[in-house]
Image (cartoon, grey):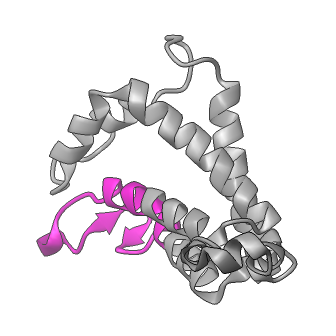
Amino acid sequence: MVGLRIVMAWVFLQAGLEKLAEGGFGDPLAWSSAGFLNNAVAEANPLRGLFLFFGQYPGLIDPLVVFGQILIGLALLFGAFVRFAAMMGGLQMLFFWTAAWQGGLAAGFPVDHGYFVDSSFVYLLLLFGLGAWGAGRILGIDGILEESEFVRNNPWLRFFMG
């Protein structure tokens, strides 16, 4: 579990830090989600309209992607709030996976490297497993936090940890 957590942490940290290193937001040479959202989603994708809608708001979407990836990576690396990080990472992977669809149900939801399953889908399943298993308790901060007086007095916080 720790190994999977670290590998997924690396995937998110690397992606977020690379985007951040490409420049500041608003810089025309910097990374932006708009190019992908407005141009890379296939016309046959049944969710294309949703991605085109998101593409109108790169000032909101770009920081969510970049800083979300960095924070998810750090949370997984240190084993802190792993369930919440896994849920947010899984949501991001779900968006990446659905954006890769080349067609609809009748076409078998083909993606670039096969039908139905691609790396985003695999990452989504791994993140689900890490959150369900409570991987932050194994050599992670979540195990320490869950024993704290604050969390014992606020048991709802356990939904975010593990």
Q: Relative to residue 88, is residue 58 drawn left or right? A: left
Q: Relative to residue 151, is residue 38 drawn left or right? A: left
Toward the right, the furthest residue is: 139
Identify the residue at image location x=58%, y=73%: 127
Q: Which quadrant of the figure contains the C terminus?
A: bottom right
Question: Quadrant of residue 61 in the image?
Answer: top left
Is 10 or 162 nearer to us in this picture?
A: 162
Is 160 or 91 nearer to us in this picture?
A: 160
Is 146 located above or below residue 42 in the figure?
Answer: below
Q: Position of residue 22 (x, y in %)?
A: 65, 24
Q: Relative to residue 69, is residue 112 drawn left or right? A: left
Toward the left, the furthest residue is: 106
Q: Which quadrant of the figure contains the N terminus?
A: bottom right
Taking the magenta stretch, the answer to whether it contains residue 105 is yes
Q: Position of residue 134 (x, y in %)?
A: 67, 84
Q: Relative to residue 83, is residue 53 drawn left or right? A: left
Taking the magenta stretch, the answer to whether it contains residue 122 is no
Question: Quadrant of residue 20 in the image?
Answer: top right
Q: Is residue 19 visible?
A: yes
Q: Position of residue 81 (x, y in %)?
A: 66, 66
Q: Position of residue 123 (x, y in %)?
A: 56, 70
Identify the residue at image location x=67%, y=46%: 70
Q: Is residue 33 visible?
A: no
Toward the bottom, the furthest residue is: 133
Chain part drawn in magenta? 93-121
Identify the residue at image location x=15%, y=53%: 44
Is 69 or 147 nearer to us in this picture?
A: 147
